[in-house]
Amino acid sequence: MNDYRILVVDDEDDLCEILKFNLENEGYWVDTANSAEEALKKDLTSYDLLLLDVMMGEISGFKMANMLKKNKSTANIPIIFITAKDTENDTMTGFNLGADDYISKPFSLREVIARVKAVIRRTATDKPDDVPEQICYKTLVLDITKKKVCIDDMEIALTKKEFEILFLLLQNKGRVFSREDILSKIWSDEVYVLDRTIDVNITRLRKKIGIYGKCIVTRLGYGYCFECE
């Protein structure tokens, strides 16, 4: 997995899931929202790119983009519009709002992936220097850049998979991830992985992070989440 996070915002649930599946196969962290209203409830500053449908409910993609560009904390988030509106005026409206690209429906997934890679490659170097490099919970510190975890300033030895699981859960506190979610995000390139593998890694991770192990909660029948005390 790489560290780039993408939010797909589209009122077509099937399309969201198709884009999520294919982008995760490319190594991105992907979340979805079925309306601008739902998307605006998320911490948008944590995303490196938004894939934004234009034709949605009360808040259109254009309106949401305009709101984001007026907010200093979200003004620099790259946006790719995905829409059935493909007239010259619509395209110009999108670019005038600060869009980084504009893809017309119907589209090929290869085209979307290529454009996503191009925008991220073009904008990644433009990130401000003050982007957080750590995720913290009390004295538990996950250093994203150095790929290490410390508790009370003492480094904890984690495997790559354990680190990525903790990163996933800690970055999305309170959100429940099913085993299928974790498999697709952490083991996306590996074909033969059993659910039991996830359970074993979770068990080892809980032991290694000591007092914070109890924060990794099992929701029977659903999956795992990091729950703040």
Image (cartoon, rainbow, N blue to C red):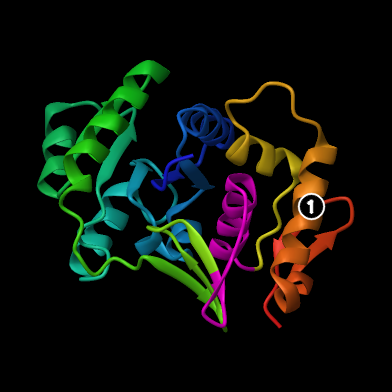
96 w.r.t. 151: above or below = above
Residue 144 in picture, x, y percent from top left: 43, 59
Residue 133 in picture, x, y percent from top left: 36, 65
Q: Is residue 1 left or right of residue 125?
A: right
- Residue located at (76% from left, 43% from top): 179
Q: Nearer the viewer, residue 151 or 30?
A: 151
Can you identify the residue that label 1 sits on? 223
Q: Is residue 111 left or right of residue 1?
A: left
The quarter of the picture where the C terminus appears is bottom right
Q: How many marks?
A: 1
Q: Nearer the viewer, residue 88 or 138?
A: 138
- The magenta region covers 150-173
Residue 170 in picture, x, y percent from top left: 58, 65
- Residue located at (30% from left, 23% from top): 114
Residue 45 in picture, x, y percent from top left: 35, 63
Q: Amino acid at mark 1?
A: Gly
- Residue located at (21% from left, 35% from top): 101
- In the rendered image, residue 89 lying in the magenta stretch gets the answer no
122 w.r.t. 40: above or below = above
Q: Nearer the viewer, residue 7 or 85?
A: 7
Q: Is residue 156 left or right of residue 7?
A: right
43 w.r.t. 224: above or below = below
- Residue located at (67% from left, 43% from top): 182
Q: Nearer the viewer, residue 133 or 226?
A: 133
Q: Is residue 15 left or right of residue 7?
A: right
Q: Secondary structure at mark 1?
A: strand
Residue 188 falls in image quadrant: top right
